[in-house]
């Protein structure tokens, strides 16, 4: 596409200066005539007259002014070497030709000036002095002149000869463009195709100079590319051509195709993408105006060509970024991060468009998998831009693309998008295999940057994208344990990823099916040991830049279950384990406090209550070991290990219930179903305690409270529907069992009445139901909540829990962090069956000390034990009756209702017995 250059030794090139060439260009652009008339025909005549006048003025200068002789020689030499016609009946083409010749003169002159330039050596005494300026440098005013010339050349020599639908027609650009479109004579020689070929050829020749090329492609790349597309790819006519018709040869068409690909590879890629999108045009629209219809739609061959070229741009290195920038910068956003970037970032439709483009595999790609393998890393890179405005645009595009690919190609998205994002968390799972080289204590397994980037990407994809696709949910489930451990660690100090971890956990828990969400919470609490969690060799550490990294921790000597003597390392290890579990449960309670409105907290609370019922229903005989003679030492050790783990689980449930009762508000239950499940769990535990003969006053109060809640619902506090009564009927078997087995006649009567009211859908309601509802409504919520909490403590304080504390303290050599419950307190049923005088002085002293314990459950249990001894007329208790009376009276002044109700039983028994 390039013209032959002049010989380097030409004298004209050596003596001609840039100023003369630019002066000639100004002369051609001089305004002439008058543009005041509003008639279109007058504007056409003025334009033609001005072009003729300026051409004549330039020729007069060449012939009459001796200072212009050198430039004339240079122009004539270039014109003689040119292979295209410069003159025509159409004055617009003659004017364009002269501008093209002068541009070639400018280019050759600039090349020779640089070749002859020999800057002197810099003066070491003045190093701050600026280096000598290159002689081919154009001033700002000179650049404006060249830009004006280029504008005329493209307007007169390229745009009028483009086919309908190729590029944007002149008449729709400016008023001057509409005039030009009408004055160009397409029938004159040379033909329109030859004119277009010549203009594009010369402009590309001039663009070989770097500074001139930047001026050409910065503003006119789209028009030149449109011309090359038309000349190189437009289908030719199949019918025989007339002799006078002139078309491009196959060689010229091939040169046009090669030139198009060259300039597409050289220019700024977002610019290439934007211009190709403009050439491709909009989809068909319903337009009444025929001209508008043509302008809106490009020919089919051009649409296919632009699609192919865009796919090639996409498959290049950094092609995704080029496509994104090309669309966003060309859609009103200015340069990425410009003044309108906020509006562009908020336009999700553009993001959806880009996502569809990126998610569609082009025909040039070898396979769909190869395409994803090449594109997905570039999509992930869009998340990590530093500039805030650019990052906001790119992140929204990346998030939308991520979601689109996950929806359309879940398997490929899981492999090439989700796995790289979640890889840092998978690396430290308890199911992962850590390489031996990385198992050295202190080795950094996941760096601070990797942790921060991983959490940030997960937040953008899951929380910001907010699309609960199956592939997204399934991919995040295995790493939830590590994510929760990281969340717990961030709560120990200031961390910028704490809120991100919390938002991610709340999002996934809210989107999961309720069963899976409960299973995940079980894993967080440690109730499900099979759930994936942080590897035992991994630990979190604060990093130097304020982030968090994951390292290999020091090996710790763990207890050997009664087979090794106790040591300080074992004590420290156990203390860290207990402290870690306590912190995790506390942070789990904080997390669940945000899940009350969605009902997840209520469902998990009910699950924990059912776990308490299972603990209460266990048979103590199952926990006893067989005689040593029937087991080997290995079997005995395994049995002991399972026994301790089982009892640790029970203590964990108790601890979890205590935290939930403390953290949850009275709005934890959000619907009738949860209320019914809560009452059912309470009734089941009461029936289990009856089977074990461990009923107590506190049990009666809990039953009264739960059945009072049912009475409130039946009494009109809630507008019940037929579907609600279907849920309430789940309580009928439990109410019947309570009415038949519970010893308290008041509770029996209330259970019978509730059974009748639910069965009749509220048609019959006794006075007992109304009184129970009124009594429940009159109670203060904080007290009721506290009673419920303390009841959780005491109802499961059976002999096997006492045995657990005893065995665990013997095995570890540590005192339990929770107060050990005395035998009389933890075994009220055993105390009832004791004969008078069977208690020892040591037992009495232990219970008396527990009556002053600061722990509410321990104190209340001790008071109830003393009350039973008085009721049974125990001799040793009667010996210190004055002291016991003093203890009861002091506890009657206690602020806690639980302690008060336990203390009042003592004086009552005194009076009756």
Image (cartoon, grey):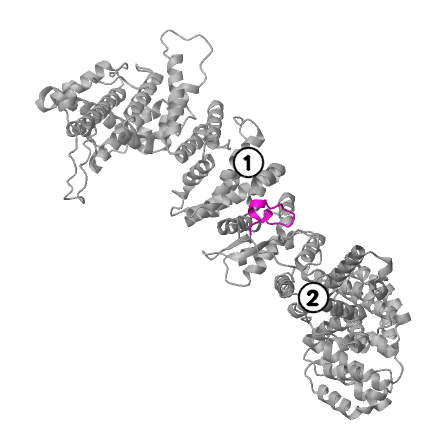
Residue 428 magenta-drawn? yes
Q: CA distance from mark 1 to mark 2?
A: 58 Å
Judged from the image, the secondary structure of the residue bearing numbered disc 2 is: helix
Placement of 74 over or under 826, stated as above or below: above
What residue sits right under mark 2 in the picture? 812
Residue 75 magenta-drawn? no
Horizontal arrangement in the rendering, residue 563 relative to residue 350 (left or right): right
Q: In which quarter of the view is residue 328 placed?
A: top left
Horizontal arrangement in the rendering, residue 440 relative to residue 743 (left or right): left
Q: Residues within 10 Å of mark 1 (few under 14, many from 20)?
A: many
Residue range of the region highlighted in magenta in the rendering: 424-440
Identify the image quadrant of the C terminus. Answer: bottom right
Q: Please provide percent x and percent y for residue 178.
A: 33, 29
What residue sits right under mark 1 in the picture? 359
Q: In which quarter of the view is residue 163 placed?
A: top left
Q: Please provide percent x and percent y for residue 363.
A: 54, 26
Horizontal arrangement in the rendering, residue 379 relative to residue 628 (left or right): left
Q: Nearer the viewer, mark 1 or mark 2?
A: 2
**Which label number is shown at residue 761?**
none
Horizontal arrangement in the rendering, residue 527 relative to residue 393 (left or right): right
Q: Please provide percent x and percent y for residue 639.
A: 79, 58
Q: Nearer the viewer, residue 398 or 353?
A: 398
Q: Please provide percent x and percent y for residue 430.
A: 64, 50
Is any part of residue 848 visible from this angle? yes
Judged from the image, the secondary structure of the residue bearing numbered disc 1 is: helix
**Which residue occupies the extreme right position in the image?**
740
């Amino acid at each position: 596409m390039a013209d032959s250059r002049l010989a380097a030794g030409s004298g004209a090139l050596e003596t001609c200066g840039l100023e003369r060439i630019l002066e000639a260009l100004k002369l051609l652009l001089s305004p002439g005539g008058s543009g005041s008339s509003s008639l279109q025909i007058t504007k056409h005549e003025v334009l033609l007259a001005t072009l003729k006048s300026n051409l004549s003025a330039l020729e007069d200068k060449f012939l009459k002014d001796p200072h212009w002789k050198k430039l004339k020689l240079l122009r004539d030499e270039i014109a003689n070497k040119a292979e295209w016609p410069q003159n025509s009946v159409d004055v617009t083409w003659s004017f364009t030709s002269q501008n093209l010749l002068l541009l070639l003169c400018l280019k050759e002159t600039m090349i020779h000036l640089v070749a002859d330039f020999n800057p002197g050596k810099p003066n070491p005494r003045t190093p701050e002095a600026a280096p000598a300026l290159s002689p081919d440098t154009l001033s700002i005013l000179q650049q404006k002149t060249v830009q004006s010339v280029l504008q005329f050349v493209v307007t007169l020599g390229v745009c009028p000869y483009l086919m309908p639908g190729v590029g944007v027609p002149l008449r729709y650009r400016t008023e001057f463009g509409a005039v030009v479109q009408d004055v160009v004579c397409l029938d004159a020689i040379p033909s329109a195709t030859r004119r277009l070929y010549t203009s594009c050829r010369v402009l590309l020749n001039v663009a070989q100079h770097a500074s001139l090329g930047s001026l050409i492609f910065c503003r006119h790349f789209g028009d030149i590319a449109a011309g090359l597309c038309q000349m190189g790819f437009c289908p030719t006519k199949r019918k025989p051509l007339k002799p006078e018709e002139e078309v491009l040869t196959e060689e010229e068409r091939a040169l046009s195709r090669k030139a198009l690909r060259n300039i597409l590879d050289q220019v700024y890629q977002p610019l290439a993408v934007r211009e190709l999108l403009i050439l491709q045009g909009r989809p068909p629209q319903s337009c009444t105006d025929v001209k508008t219809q043509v302008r809106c739609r490009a020919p089919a061959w051009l649409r296919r060509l632009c699609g192919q070229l865009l796919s090639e741009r996409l498959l290049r290195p950094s092609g995704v970024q080029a496509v994104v920038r090309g669309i966003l910068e060309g859609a009103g956003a200015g340069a990425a991060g410009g003044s309108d970037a906020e509006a562009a970032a908020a336009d999700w439709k553009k993001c959806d468009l880009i996502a569809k483009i990126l998610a569609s595999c082009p025909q040039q790609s070898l396979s769909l998998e190869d395409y994803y393998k090449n594109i997905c890393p570039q999509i992930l890179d869009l998340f990590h831009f530093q500039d805030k405005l650019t990052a906001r645009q790119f992140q929204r595009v990346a998030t939308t693309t991520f979601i689109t690919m996950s929806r359309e190609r879940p398997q490929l998205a899981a492999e090439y998008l989700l796995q790289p994002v979640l890889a840092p968390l998978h690396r430290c799972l308890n199911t992962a295999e850590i390489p031996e080289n990385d198992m050295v204590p202190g080795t950094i397994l996941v760096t601070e940057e990797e942790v921060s980037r991983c959490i940030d990407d997960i937040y953008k994809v899951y929380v910001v994208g907010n699309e609960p696709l199956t592939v997204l949910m399934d991919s995040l489930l295995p790493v939830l344990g590590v994510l929760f451990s990281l969340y717990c660690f961030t709560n120990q100090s200031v961390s910028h990823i704490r809120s991100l971890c919390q938002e991610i956990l709340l999002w996934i828990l809210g989107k999961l099916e309720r069963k899976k969400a409960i299973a995940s919470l079980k894993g967080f609490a440690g109730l499900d040991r099979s759930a994936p969690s942080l590897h035992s060799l991994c630990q979190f550490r604060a990093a130097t830049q304020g982030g968090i990294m994951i390292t290999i921790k020091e090996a710790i000597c763990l207890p050997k279950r009664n087979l090794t003597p106790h040591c300080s390392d074992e004590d420290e290890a156990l203390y860290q384990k207990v402290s870690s579990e306590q912190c995790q449960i506390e942070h789990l309670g904080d997390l669940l406090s945000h899940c009350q409105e969605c009902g997840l907290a209520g469902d998990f609370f009910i699950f924990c209550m059912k776990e308490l019922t299972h603990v209460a229903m266990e048979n103590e005989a199952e926990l006893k070991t067989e005689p040593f003679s029937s087991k080997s030492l290995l079997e005995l050790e395994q049995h002991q290990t399972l026994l301790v783990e089982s009892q640790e689980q029970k203590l964990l449930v108790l601890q979890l219930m205590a935290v939930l009762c403390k953290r949850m508000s009275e709005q934890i239950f959000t619907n009738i179903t949860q209320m019914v499940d809560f009452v059912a769990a309470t009734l089941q535990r009461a029936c289990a305690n009856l089977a074990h003969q461990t009923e107590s006053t506190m049990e009666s109060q809990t039953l009264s409270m739960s059945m009072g809640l049912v009475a409130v619902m039946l009494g009109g506090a809630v507008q019940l529907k037929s579907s609600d009564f279907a849920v309430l009927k789940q309580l009928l078997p439990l109410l019947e069992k309570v009415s038949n087995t519970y010893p308290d006649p008041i509770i029996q009567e209330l259970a019978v009445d509730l059974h009748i009211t639910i069965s009749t859908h509220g048609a019959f309601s006794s006075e007992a139901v109304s009184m129970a509802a009124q009594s429940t409504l009159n109670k203060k919520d904080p007290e009721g909540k506290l009673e419920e909490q303390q009841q959780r403590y005491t109802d499961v304080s059976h002999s096997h829990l006492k045995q657990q504390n005893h065995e665990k303290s013997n095995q570890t050599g540590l005192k339990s962090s929770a107060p050990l419950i005395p035998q009389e307190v933890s075994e009220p049923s055993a105390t009832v069956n004791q004969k008078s005088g069977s208690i020892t002085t040591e037992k009495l002293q232990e219970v008396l000390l527990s009556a002053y314990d600061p722990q509410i459950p321990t104190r209340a249990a001790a008071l109830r034990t003393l009350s039973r001894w008085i009721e049974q007329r125990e001799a040793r208790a009667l010996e210190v009756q004055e002291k016991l009376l003093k203890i009861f009276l002091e506890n009657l002044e206690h602020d806690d209702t639980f302690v008060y109700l336990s203390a009042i039983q003592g004086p009552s028994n005194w009076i009756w017995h």
